[in-house]
Amino acid sequence: MAIEEKLAELCIILPEVAAPVGSYVPVRLTGNLAFVSGMLPTAGGQVKQTGHVGEGVTTQEAYVLARICAINGLAALKRAIGTLDRVKGIAMVQGFVQTTSDYAEAPKVINGASDLLVALFGDAGRHARFAVGVASLPMNAPVEVAFIAEIMP
Amino acid sequence: MAIEEKLAELCIILPEVAAPVGSYVPVRLTGNLAFVSGMLPTAGGQVKQTGHVGEGVTTQEAYVLARICAINGLAALKRAIGTLDRVKGIAMVQGFVQTTSDYAEAPKVINGASDLLVALFGDAGRHARFAVGVASLPMNAPVEVAFIAEIMP
Amino acid sequence: MAIEEKLAELCIILPEVAAPVGSYVPVRLTGNLAFVSGMLPTAGGQVKQTGHVGEGVTTQEAYVLARICAINGLAALKRAIGTLDRVKGIAMVQGFVQTTSDYAEAPKVINGASDLLVALFGDAGRHARFAVGVASLPMNAPVEVAFIAEIMP
């Protein structure tokens, strides 16, 4: 199934690509790799929810936010390469969760991004990953997700 | 010397590969690169020691834990590519240490992983690296180490 | 314009390459990629300023420190590949800011590195990026910047 159809089946509408919050670009292509910048759970330029996971933000809420990060990354990737059908697979997800120091469930949060990528791309979407809890994130966002995709020429 | 012999010489027995603590895979191959997921210092599914370095966990203890992370990553890499003799070199180590905010010795901790990779692969094991102190890690682990290896076709 | 001339125009003198603060190398080449290790804002082996951004260190001070990190990375890269004219572009910047938990401006800090790379390499310097706030950094440095460059054969 083409990825566009799969997106529709998953009821995902790719948003407008948010302007980067700094002097970088959302996606950089080099060889067969696409580096997708750290994406925040924004819609219309606003972070959908703010705060630290483990204090104000629950794991389940942050899971949903991580999914939004991944969708924002896919929107940026589509704009960069024309169509997501050119995605050969996802190589690596870099997941950052804004947490208190006693929080231990970052993987459950970043699963929000990973589950979506696997649902969309199937086995080709299975990726290596790190998930860590950081002191602070831009715009007080609970989650930031970057990833590296493998692209067909 | 073949890497398997070198492992024996270093008295390292590669463990069973732990199931990922989320919806990702331990190793993802793309082109000549192998992305190895963030590994925790686990044995038998349990983290060997928990807590923050600089408070409860010492730098020396965390050094040993970082070494275990690297060994777990090598076990996963071997399973993915058949034999570690196919490793051409280590490109990058991504080291995360769970620390208090006044801790400044993350490099000494991540040396536990780096020293092992250099002992095993020699000059080919010399890698670029970052080492940072994060607020929290999965399972309250003191260390998480991901790395990128270069693989022979 | 050749990069060396551009450096002069920007009044940048590349420093001596600092010895790594651990058992790794400043730059690792693999295929067409150069992985540049996490660089600290050091001069002569000393971090120029210490402390957390949001408490003692201002965003503007940290911006300047991030620029120094990038310059240190470029010095290491030049030593590894002979001349910066071999840099085809910058693929990814990995930016870590040592922050309090309520700081939300990590992108403004890492812009210090990003702005320099774009000033130096032009459009080829436009890169993907993540910028996160971490609990602690080596040597109590306010910033650490790693990057991945694309190199001409």
Image: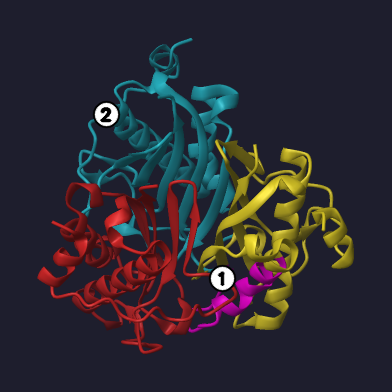
Chain colours: A yellow, B red, C cyan
- Quadrant in which the N terminus of chain B appears: bottom left
Residue A68 image point, x, y percent: 75, 64
Q: Name which quarter of the figure residue A29 lies in.
A: top right
Residue C79 image point, x, y percent: 27, 29
Depth check: give the residue in front, B109 or A116.
A116
Residue C54 visible in the picture: no
**Residue shown at 64%/61% (left/top)?**
A125
Which mark is in front, 1 or 2?
A: 1
**Residue shown at 45%/73% (left/top)?**
B135
Magenta stretch encompasses residue A108: yes
Disc 1 and disc 2: Cα gap in Å?
37 Å
Q: Is residue B138 left or right of residue A4?
A: left
Q: Label 2's element?
A: helix
Mark carried by residue C79: 2
B56, above or below C50, in the image: below
Magenta stretch encompasses residue A51: no
Depth check: give the residue in front, C30 or A25.
C30
Tally the marks. Answer: 2
**Parent chain of label 1:** B
Residue C36 image point, x, y percent: 37, 42
Q: Label 1's element?
A: loop
Q: Is residue A62 left or right of residue C79?
A: right
Residue A76 image point, x, y percent: 73, 46
Residue annotated with mark 1 = B24
Q: Residues within 10 Å of mark 2 (few under 14, many from 20)?
A: some
Amino acid carrying label 1: it is Tyr
Depth check: give the residue in front, A43 or B68.
B68
Amino acid carrying label 2: it is Arg
**Residue shown at 34%/79% (left/top)?**
B41
Q: Is residue A92 left or right of residue B59?
A: right
* Residue under disc 1 on the same chain as residue under disc 2: no
Q: Which residues are magenta?
A: A97-116
